[in-house]
Image (cartoon, helix red, strand yellow):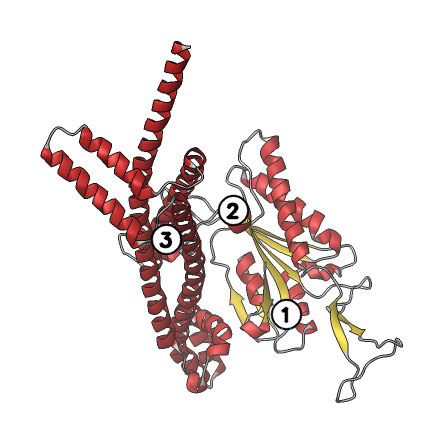
Amino acid sequence: MTQIKRSAGQSAVAAAAYRSGEKLHSEYYGEDSDYTRKGGVICSEILLPSHAPPEYADRETLWNAVEKAERGKKAQLAYSFDIALQNEFSLEENIALARQFLLENFVSRGMVVDFAVHQPDKEDGGIPNPHFHVMCPIRPIEPDGRWGNKQRREYVLDEYRERIRDEAGNYVFNAVPTTDWGKPETLEAWRQAWADLCNAKFAEKELDCRIDHRSYVRQGVEQVPTVHEGVSVRAMEKKGIPTDKGDFNRWVRSANAKLKNIRQTIANLLAWLKEAKAELSKPQEPLLADLLGRYYSGRNAGAWSQKAKLGNLKSYSAAVNYLSANRIYTLSNLEERLTCRKETADSLKASLSAKEKRMGELDRLVQLAGFYREGRPVYDKLNSIKWKKKREECAAEQEHALHFFYMARRELKPYLAEGGKLPVKDWQEEKTRLQQECQEEAGKLKKIHADLKSIRQIQYAVGSVQYDEQHRAQARTRKNEIEL
């Protein structure tokens, strides 16, 4: 869920036109947004509570009314939801499920709902991505059909229940929302309601799959997310043309595989350490170097050639050097190092996630800058034409370029300097720096892999000594039982 707001250069009318695949006119901006040639829009519909004016069933009327009700240049206009549908359900089942969810959870609260179901064409071998977009005005509708207030004033009182004034003489108050629509708890309830509705449908169809409304972090699934590639990037990748996003996602998948391997290896080693410590714990914990010495002495006793004995000596020396260099003397020291490695891997995961998010934002800004740069000459030329007919002809010919220019100008408004300059170079340099940092962190993952390889060799040697001692102890027990 996000907000559509003027402070980000957004238009509720343009957003509604895109989602519904229609042509709508914005009275506030004086612009037409035409998405009638947009593919993949299966259906769109407006759901109204009983007290809403019936004319709001018209999309253009509804969102122009929302724009008119908001006077602020930085006004928040609408909530926007993007919700994934399920490939296991038919299109009709998905649409019915979406409508049921919106009626039970949104319209029942008095919210106006504008929703559209999208099902983009999938590429060969690709996974279908059916989903639906929802827009709801933030300002509630009163029982008389007029727009209500988004907030109310709650005055701060002193111990005598009197209003408190600030230094300027104004009463101090807190702005309290008139609805709970924007609260995190409400969004959480909606997400769970959607998951429950889908899971009930899975159960009804006797399917084993289930969805979870919680994030990967809350589920305990630790992995770095990939960036959204989009249709253009996938088309280029399919033709064998490498892209920055494609390269980054391939790197992320490789890093995720390494992180998964690291976590699994550490978990296995920690489990082994727990068992080994339980077996080997004595008043004084045995030194790892001593255990390694007993292991390689046993190997040398059974070695038939000088070459094998020399190989055992080199392996023993390498293991002892590793332990000495890292100040690992006992199993407890080894456990501390593994725990430290686990914390490092977790920290790398968090760092990579943050960098991935920022690089996605930078890619979007650079893309918008390109739209702005390409469309600005067309926009200037259009404004230089005095004759209305010629202006209309020019606008029709350059409709595509103007549409992307207007969109880019709205979203880049906070970044535009005097003369219409944009810090594109700074964005590109920041992304290059982030990519270099990602590569450095990949090198750290490689070092952890090498470290774990040395520890696993030590694990094998210590485990062998432990097994031999247990075997000899069992043999002595059996011998004593026979003698008795």
Image quarter (top left, top right, bottom left or bottom right) of the C terminus? top left
Amino acid under disc 2: Gly
At 39% from the left and 45% from the top, the residue drawn is 260
Which sits in the foreground, 147 or 292? 292
Q: Secondary structure at mark 1?
A: strand
Mark 2 or 1, which is nearer the eye?
2
- For residue 252, which numbered disc appears in the image? 3
Between marks 2 and 3 in the image, the one whose residue lies nearer the viewer:
2
In front of the other: 53 or 157: 157
Tell me what residue is drawn at x 79 percent, y 58 percent: 51
For the residue carrying disc 3, how many other residues have a C-alpha within 10 Å: few (<14), some (14-19), or many (20+)?
A: many
- Residue pictured at 76% horizontal, 59% vertical: 52
Decide: marks 3, 1 in contact (CB < 8 A)?
no
Q: Which residue is mark 2?
A: 220
Count neighbours of disc 1 (C-alpha within 10 A) and say few if under 14, some if 14 to 19, many if 20 or more.
Answer: many
Spatial distance from mark 3 to mark 1, Cα to Cα?
A: 35 Å
- Seen from the viewer's position, the closer of residues 453 and 5 is 453
Q: Would residue 227 be found to the left or right of residue 297 on screen?
A: right
- Could you say where residue 297 lies in the image, as x and y percent from the top left? 22, 34
Left or right: residue 156 compared with residue 122:
right
For the point 47% across and 75% down, the residue is 412
Please say whether residue 23 is visible from this viewpoint: no
Q: Earlier in the sequence, mark 2 or mark 1?
A: 1
Going by the image, does 132 lie left or right of 159? left
Q: Earlier in the sequence, mark 3 or mark 1?
A: 1
> Disc 3 residue type?
Val
Locate residue 27: give its quadrant: bottom right
Q: What is the secondary structure assignment of the residue under circle 2?
A: loop
Tag shown at residue 76: 1
For label 2, the crowd category at 10 Å Cα-Cα, with few meaning under 14, some 14 to 19 and many 20 or more, is: few
Q: Tell me where residue 238 appears, x and y as whole percent.
A: 31, 50
Q: Earlier in the sequence, mark 2 or mark 3?
A: 2
